[in-house]
Image (cartoon, rainbow, N blue to C red):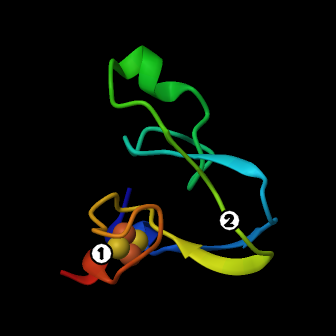
């Protein structure tokens, strides 16, 4: 993965829908979990939902302090 691939992914979130945000970087379906953590014995996904329909920038570098949202940490 090159540096630029760690940019956040703009995602349309639906109100009250459950999402599994990948925490381990191994998923091929970023920013969401595809089950790859199991084969890599890595950290499980973080389940979250939004209280409104909105566009959100979801972190792919996994360094954010505001999971699952990008906080700009990928630039550091
Ligand atoms: S992609 Fe921006 S903080 Fe991770």
- Quarter of the rendering occupied by the C terminus: bottom left
Label 1: how many Cα within 10 Å (few below 14, some 14–19, many 20+): some
Residue beneath the point at 26% across and 83% down:
75
Residue 50: mark in rendering: 2
Residue beneath the point at 48% across and 38% down:
45
Q: Is residue 64 left or right of residue 11?
A: left
Label 2: how many Cα within 10 Å (few below 14, some 14–19, many 20+): some
Residue furthest to the left in view is 76
The response on whether ligand 1 sits within 8 Å of label 1 is yes
Relative height, residue 15 to residue 36 (above, below): below
Q: Is residue 42 left or right of residue 32?
A: left
The residue to which callout 1 is attached is: 74
Q: Nearer the viewer, mark 1 or mark 2?
A: 2
Residue beneath the point at 40% across and 45% down:
23
Relative height, residue 23 to residue 63 (above, below): above
Instruction: Name the spot of residue 50 as percent of width and height, x first.
Output: 68, 65
Callout 1: helix, strand or loop?
A: helix
- Quarter of the rendering occupied by the N terminus: bottom left
Ligand 1 placement by image quarter: bottom left
Q: Quadrant of residue 5?
A: bottom left
Instruction: Name the spot of residue 74 as percent of width and height, x first.
Output: 30, 75
């Amino acid at each position: 993965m090159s540096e630029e691939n760690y940019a956040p992914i703009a995602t349309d979130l639906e109100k009250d829908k459950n999402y599994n945000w990948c925490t381990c970087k191994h998923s091929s379906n970023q920013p969401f979990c595809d089950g790859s953590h199991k084969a890599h014995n890595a950290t499980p996904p973080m389940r979250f939902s939004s209280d409104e329909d909105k566009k959100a920038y979801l972190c792919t570098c996994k360094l954010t302090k505001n999971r699952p949202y990008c906080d700009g940490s990928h630039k550091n």
